[in-house]
Amino acid sequence: MTPTIGVFDSGFGGLTVLRALLDRLPLAHYAFIGDTARLPYGSKSRRTIARYAAESAQFLVHKQGAQFLVIACNTASALALDAIQAAVPVPVLGVIEPGAAAAHRASRSGDVLVIATDATVQSHAYAAACQALGLRALEKACPLLVPLVEEGWTNHPVTAEVIRIYLAELLDEATAMGMKPDTLVLGCTHYPLLRPLLEAAVPAGMKVIDSAEATAEAVARLFGHPATEADTPSNQRELMRQEGEDEGAQRLPPTAQVQVRCFATDSVEKFERLGSRFLNREVGPVELVDLGG
């Protein structure tokens, strides 16, 4: 049976995670929901974020038959992952632990930088995930980058200058703390669209980690490629141990056809207009759903 993977975001930035999943697991079926009626999540309380995220997760599982969930939202991954896991009876993977694990594999100095939105930085979720792996992480909020991406200024000199200023401030702070960072983690699903500008702006030799790519790689390992303890986020290790006897059920059949359905709770026209930029292909018709207030 071809598995259905549910992907959730508060908006449509998480389509970069779906894009990475499609590249690695093109034979799965996908259901993506963007809770566009209730964004931004970053201005909400933890309790409200947990309720909103759980409702979207339940829609994907109970209405769309998702057998595995990817939380393609850094804010929800940081503040509501436990609530989502408690709300649905399927495995759930967020974007933060895979990003931290990829940084751990890439870094030689043990010092990493993280750029993200205000809400994600204030949660210190990346710092905690990195610390658990023996890394020192310095986080910085970059609030101007999301609106620049949504404006379509992904290769604009203004955006390049904003990135230069943010990174200069972050590197100065790292130097003042005695850090020698060699890795930069992109802690927002909008940021992959800025990767060329970011790679041009970081010091020579610094690795740029895309948490969307890292998350897709973690999912791909779970669905058919043996993963090591170091490569697999901790909240998935027990899942793999429990389901290891039935490894064949996790492998994708060779004859399945890709199927993607996209849902939004508001702004369907905007989703369809901007979504292809994040997905790097047409998103097709987006279906409007009502999850309540």
Image (cartoon, grey):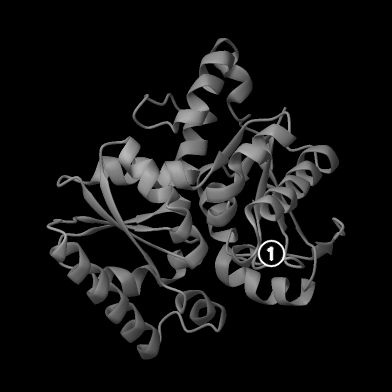
**Residue 63 as seen in the image, left or right of residue 150:** right
Q: Residue at the spot x=60%, y=30% of the render?
A: 252
* Residue 85: % across, % down: 65, 35
**Residue 183 as seen in the image, left or right of residue 10:** left
The residue tagged 1 is 283
| Helix, strand or loop status at disc 1 | loop
Residues 62 and 53: in front is 53
Note whether 120 is above or below 259 in the view shown: below
Note whether 1 is above or below 259 in the view shown: above
Amino acid carrying label 1: it is Val
- Residue 160, quarter of picture: bottom left
Give the position of the C terminus as an image quadrant: bottom right
Give the position of the N terminus as an image quadrant: top right
Residue 67: tell me if it is visible: no
* Residue 236: % across, % down: 51, 28
Residues 259 and 60: in front is 60
Q: Residue at the spot x=34%, y=36% of the render?
A: 132
Q: Quick one: which residue is furthest to the top in this view?
A: 245
* Residue 44: % across, % down: 65, 62
Note whether 129 is above or below 118 in the view shown: above
Q: How many marks?
A: 1
Q: Residue at the spot x=41%, y=72% of the render?
A: 142
Q: Residue at the spot x=28%, y=79% of the render?
A: 164
Residue 165: tell me if it is visible: yes
**Residue 127 as seen in the image, left or right of residue 286:** left
Q: Quick one: which residue is furthest to the bottom in this view?
A: 158
At label 1, counting other C-alpha atoms closer than 10 Å, the crowd grade (few under 14, some 14-19, many 20 or more) is some
